Image: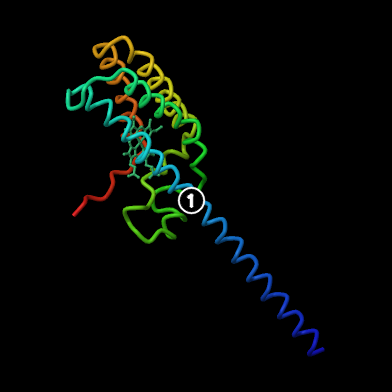
Amino acid sequence: MQKLMMLMVCACVSVAICSAAAVSAEDEDLVAAVKERRDLMKKTVQPAATLGGDMIKGKKPYDATEAAKAMNAISGVPDKYVTLFPKGTEHGGVADSQIAEEDDRSQAKPEIWEDFADFKKIAMKLKDASAKAAGAAEQGKGTFTAAFNDMTKVCKECHESYRETPPKKK
Ligand code: HEC
């Protein structure tokens, strides 16, 4: 009898260990999704947009090939981007409880999951607008500027609805 009890206790403990491990593997996936999507914005979208803006402002010489390349880089992001929003990765969600640095936590508003179709629609708008800007690049700076400005309106549109204002840098 005592032996049976021991066996049962052991079985319970190992189930508990296994399920705890499974949960944290899932959490790791959530944390990875936040990191990957933030990196796409920070390391691909933002530098490309900054380069385009600098050319328009004359901080950098206008180069149609470089401008088109930058806009195509942005256009390549949205399809992947919208796959990186599993539930639990909203601002203040499960993923955030696993991320030590406040600066690295999710800035995704919970509203994204209330109307994911709308979020996706704006992402696809960015894909189209940046592709258009890429096409406009070779038609000269004036045409590019107009298309670029149309594109940055989409950044703003999405951030206003779906991005939490990040904490102020000290
Ligand atoms: C479809 C919605 C959407 C569009 C369009 C969009 N963003 Fe974002 N962006 C977000 C969300 C949501 C976050 C916060 C993501 C997070 O915390 O996981 C974000 C975050 C960022 C960040 C902060 C990244 C970081 O980790 O510090 C930058 C920079 C950024 N976006 C730039 C841009 C630029 C530039 C454009 C336009 C060329 C753009 N975004 C278009 C939704 C969007």
User: In the image, 99: left or right of 26?
Assistant: left
Q: Position of residue 147 (x, y in %)?
A: 31, 16
Three-letter amino acid code of the residue under disc 1: Ala
Give the farthest residue toward the top: 139
Query: Could you tell me which secondary element the residue under label 1 belongs to?
Result: helix
In the rendered image, the quadrant that contains the C terminus is bottom left
**What is the total number of numbered labels drawn onto the structure image?**
1
User: In the image, 142: left or right of 123?
Assistant: left
At a point 44% along the width and 32% down the height, the residue shown is 77
In the rendered view, would you say 164 is above or below 92? Answer: above
Q: Nearer the viewer, residue 128 or 112?
A: 128
Q: Position of residue 13 (x, y in %)?
A: 66, 76
Q: Nearer the viewer, residue 124 or 4?
A: 124
Task: Check disc 1 and report the residue beneath it.
Answer: 32
Image-quarter location of ligand 1: top left
At a point 57% along the width and 58% down the height, the residue shown is 25
Give the farthest residue toward the right: 1
